[in-house]
Amino acid sequence: MLEKGQNWELFGYDVRHLGRYWTAAWRDMLWAHDSPVRRRLDEVVAVDTGHASVFYQAGAVCAGQADAACAAILLPDDLVLCKQIAVPLQAESEIDSLLELEVRASSPFSTGDTRWGWAVVGRDEAGIRVALAIVSASATMAFLGREHNIHDSGAREVWAEGAGVMVVVQGFGEGLREQRYRRRLLQCAGLLGVIAAILLAMVGAAAVFKSVELQRLETITAATTRAAAEASRLRTLLAVANETIGAANEVVARYPNPHAEIARLTKLLGDDASITSFSMAGPDIRLRGRAADAALVMQQLTDEPAYSRVLAPQAISRLADGQEQFSLDIRVGDEVSE
């Protein structure tokens, strides 16, 4: 018996939340940090590490681009509270809510002063491991103003490094990059829509052309059919005649001539035997007669190569005049399995 709470579970997933899982899958494919789409379309970010500028795209180091439209500041480790969290696969669709609860439980800062972000560290069969970075908004702005003369929270993105990956801290200047990425997604979607429309138009044009060609072929076919109607009728009659001839030949081959069989029996039996009844149905002969030695007659017929089977359906009986009466079933030609 399944427990009450497991009635809606399939392979560890609650089937009542399939819509949520579907939405989460699309969100991960388009917006996740390790999304293959994001690796292609995300903006290049110039990250100021305090010593040099390193260029990143979708969280991975890339070749330097002097015209990078987005810029970020890397916070020093002493301003970041970083921890790793293991998230099971079943809870991946609820990862934002799960991490938000973790932030509330772990943040030493007030709710209004807390900013956080996360990035995927690795995946395995059990789930995913994420790096969670928690910072103080006031301490971060004090650092930006002191070290970079930045007093607008939306002027730069704020990044932190934890567990060997870069984490984007939400609530600062990441909106510009998200806006550009969203615009590129819409452009790609529009381009795909145009391509789909062109393909549909091509398919429609091909269908129309094929329809016209089919109508033309149907007209030609109808004319050819009418012109060849008489020839088709004669060909049908010829085929029927050939079938009739073939059937007649088959009947002749399967049903031997009884006159020939009577002549053969007359030659085989000699003067010591007489036939009182002869009937033939196809290759089967029913023979009754008398002979001084009925067993010898049966043996002579059995030795005849033209006969494949000689059977005595009745026992040999002796008559008053000393002769023996026999009844035989004979098969002419090869034995046919029935």
Image (cartoon, rainbow, N blue to C red):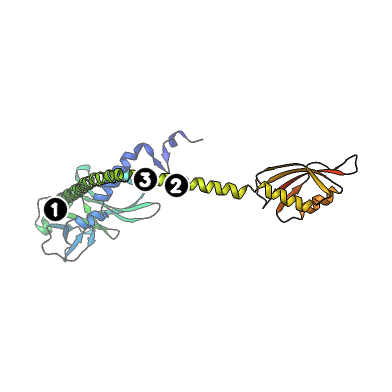
Residue 262 in picture, x, y percent from top left: 72, 48
Which residue is denoted by mark 1 in the rendering? 142
Local crowd at mark 1 within 10 Å, few (<14), some, or many (≥20)? some
Which residue is denoted by mark 3 in the rendering? 232
Lateral position of residue 329 relative to residue 192, left or right: right
Are the residues at dot 1 and dot 2 in contact (C-beta closer than 8 Å)? no
Residue 327 in picture, x, y percent from top left: 79, 43
Q: Which residue: 38% across, 43% down?
A: 233
Q: CA distance from mark 1 to mark 3?
A: 99 Å
Q: Is residue 102 visible?
A: no
Residue 268 in picture, x, y percent from top left: 77, 53
Please state which amino acid type lies under the numbered disc 2: Ala
Please state which amino acid type lies under the numbered disc 3: Ser
Local crowd at mark 3 within 10 Å, few (<14), some, or many (≥20)? few
Lateral position of residue 246 relative to residue 338, left or right: left
Q: Quadrant of the C terminus?
A: top right
Are the residues at dot 3 and dot 2 in contact (C-beta closer than 8 Å)? no
- Label 1 or label 3, whichever lies nearer to me, is 3
Please state which amino acid type lies under the numbered disc 1: Ala
Which residue is denoted by mark 2 in the rendering? 239
